Image: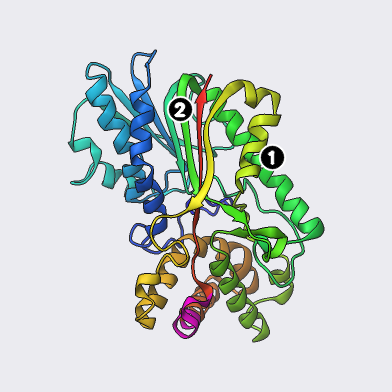
Amino acid sequence: MKHSPHYPMKSTEGMVDYDRNSAAQQQIVNTQSARIRELVECLSPAGPEVTVVDYGCGPGSSAVEAVRPSIEVCRARFPDLPVSVVHADQPGNDWNALFELVYGTTGYQGEAGGIRTSAAVGTFYGQMVPANSVDMATCFAASHWLSRAVDVHLPGSIWFADAAGEARAQLWDQARQDWVAFLSRRADELRSGGHLLVATLGSVPEDDEINGTAASGRGIYRAIQVVAQSMADDGLIDAAILDNFVFALWFMTEIEARRPLEDDAVLSEAFDILEISVAPAPGNYRDVFGAFAGDPDEYAKRYRGYIRAFADSTLRKQLLEPSAKDAKDADKLADEFFDRLEELYRTETSKYAFELWHLLVVLKKT
């Protein structure tokens, strides 16, 4: 959950120790390493260099691991061609932290010569690199963020999967438009024969669930709602603001991800579909931190760290700061929020477990 649409001055603001608390993001990257290698093995570069782009890279080590398989195959297959690695994200990404990792002891810059590293700064719902320039593109745990916050009235919930009626229609309309825009810009940027691999959080059919789908992270977002409501009930945050706050994201089902690629005339011509699937994450997909459930204190700390790493900036900008008197008061509200969240996980343990299904989209530019 790296790519936040709310554009604070620093998009990673509030991502407390993001690298240490990004286990789910790193897992998604690691599970696709072999697939990336296979795709790069199939490339026939047409330009003076091989260009690899990771969209929505974020500031952590997962950004390094996202491009490492491509680099290693390129150095073996095309030893005479320079490799251009482009890390693409919003202006507020913690670029210093990222490039310290790239050039650090575990970074890829120390492993082989002929690698040119650069940053593309902007939104991946628009063009980020030159047209017809990219050989291998990846996007991990980022494309589920919408391009903007959606103004919906949704009392009792702060996330898309529990929305119904007009609120759900508004959120889906934005999600669909954004997915088409994302794919369209990648169609512009990829060279013929280039590949795009998107791996993020998905949803699966479940008859007993609201709207007939079970979405990744449903426990986490319902825990956030419980805590936020408790603070509203105690007069610490504005109840009216809470009733109109929703995280601007959408975790797609396989059908939702596939439909534009088959029905949109431009996209169906631009891409061959190699795979679109939603599957349980490796390991304990019913509880990402289930290995720590026997130790309630550690279990609660893991959830606090993970949720604060991706959610703090959104909660501050859209919920806590509008309810606060000043910046100092917003900091106090944030600490109170995550103290309550940690206590909820300490006492309820697996009731709000982080379930995780991976959505995988693999495309080839025609």
Three-letter amino acid code at the position of disc 1: Gln
Residue under the point 43% across and 61% down: 15
Using residue 356 as the reference point, say whether residue 82 is left or right of it: left
Q: Is residue 178 above or below residue 207?
A: above
- Please give the name of the residue rendered at 37% of the width and 47% of the height, measured from the top-left corner: 31
Asked if residue 160 shows in the view, the reply is: no
Mark drawn on residue 150: none
Expressed as whole percent of the image width and height from the top left, the position of residue 279 reads: 50, 50
Locate residue 336 relative to residue 135 in the image: left or right: right
Give the amino acid type for the residue marked by disc 2 in the picture: His
Q: Quadrant of residue 298?
A: bottom left
Residue under label 2, please give it.
Answer: 195
* Residue extending furthest toward the front: 207
Boundaries of the magenta span = 343-351
> Residue most toward the right?
166
| Residue 343 as seen in the image, left or right of residue 30 | right
From the top left corner, tell me how far across and down residue 129 is, in percent. 48, 27
Q: Please report whichever mark, 2 or 1, sits nearer to the chain's N-terminal start.
A: 1
Mark 1: secondary structure = helix
Q: Residue at x 50, y 25 (%)?
A: 364
User: Disc 2 vs disc 1: Cβ atoms closer than 8 Å?
Assistant: no
Query: Which labelled disc corresponds to residue 177?
Result: 1
Q: Main secondary structure of the magenta part?
A: helix
Query: For this rendering, which residue is in front, 49 or 325?
Result: 49
Foreground: 101 or 64? 64
Distance from label 2 to label 1 (Cα)? 22 Å
Image position of 30 (left or right of 191): left
Is residue 347 inside the magenta stretch? Answer: yes
Residue 124 image point, x, y percent: 54, 37
